[in-house]
Amino acid sequence: MAILKIVKYGDPILRQKSQPISEINNDVKQLAEDMLETMYFAHGVGLAAPQIGLSLQICVIDVLPEGKNKPYVFINPKIVSGENKVEQEEGCLSFPKIYEKVKRFDKVQVEYTDLKGNINTVSAEGFFAKACQHEIDHLNGKVFIDYLPDWKRKQVEKEIKRRKKSKTW
Ligand SMILES: [Zn+2]
């Protein structure tokens, strides 16, 4: 078990499309465990491999309140369908203290490979659905501020620039 370092926005890895995982070996199982541990440690509800500096198609999610665990490990996941877009506030472990409203599906179907190598489909709703879309976006080099209107995204980028300058990013 290990707590991994989370990279922040500005690191080019967050803009890369991740590589599919072809074999679920012990390294992948260990990585999933470490990612979950890192996510809980950071009080997050989701974490994708690019956020810990690895360009691999794996992400972990657990949207239950602390103390009640229901972890999901998604390998090579994709959103196969979605319905009913809603706007809600979102944050990201790679964007500390930045929260913005983003419009996403309220209900999605996610197809993914699990740690046993089986292909599963899960129906996600509400907060869980939002987390699935957010984390899968990371595997495709996309981040939540990409959904903001131009002026708003520029404002956020300016704030990040300011924080980088003052070494608080
Ligand atoms: Zn994120």
Image: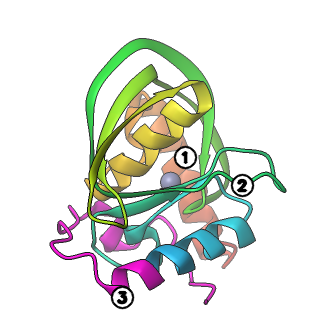
Q: Give the range drawn in magenta.
A: 1-30
Residue lying at 51% horizontally and 33% vertically, measured from the top left: 130
Residue type, numbered disc 3 = Asp
Residue 21 drawn in magenta? yes
Q: Residue at x 79, y 46 (%)?
A: 65
Residue at 37%, 69% in the rendered image: 50
Give the total of numbered labels.
Answer: 3
What colouring style does the render use? rainbow
Report helix, strand or loop for mark 3: helix
Verify whether residue 8 appears in magenta: yes
Marked residue nearer the N-terminal end (2 or 3): 3
Which quadrant of the structure image shows residue 164?
bottom right
Q: Is residue 166 visible?
A: yes
Q: Distance between the residues labelled 2 and 1?
A: 32 Å
Q: On the rendered structure, is 101 left or right of 48?
A: right
Dot label at residue 69: 2
Query: Are the residues at dot 2 and dot 3 in contact (C-beta closer than 8 Å)?
Result: no
- Local packing at callout 1 (Cα closer than 10 Å; few below 14, some 14-19, many 20+) is some
Q: Which mark is residue 156?
A: 1
**Mark seen at residue 57:** none
User: Which one is nearer the viewer's eye here, 55 or 146?
Assistant: 55
**Would you say residue 6 is visible in this rendering?**
no
Give coordinates of residue 122: x percent, y percent. Answer: 40, 36
Q: Does mark 3 have its CB less than 8 Å from ligand 1?
A: no
Q: Which amino acid does label 1 sit on?
A: Val
Which of the labelled discs sits on residue 27, or is there none?
Answer: 3
User: First in sequence: mark 1 or mark 3?
Assistant: 3
Spatial separation of the CA atoms under disc 2 and disc 3: 23 Å
User: Looking at this view, is 13 or 25 the one in front?
Assistant: 25
Residue 126 vs 66, above or below: the answer is above
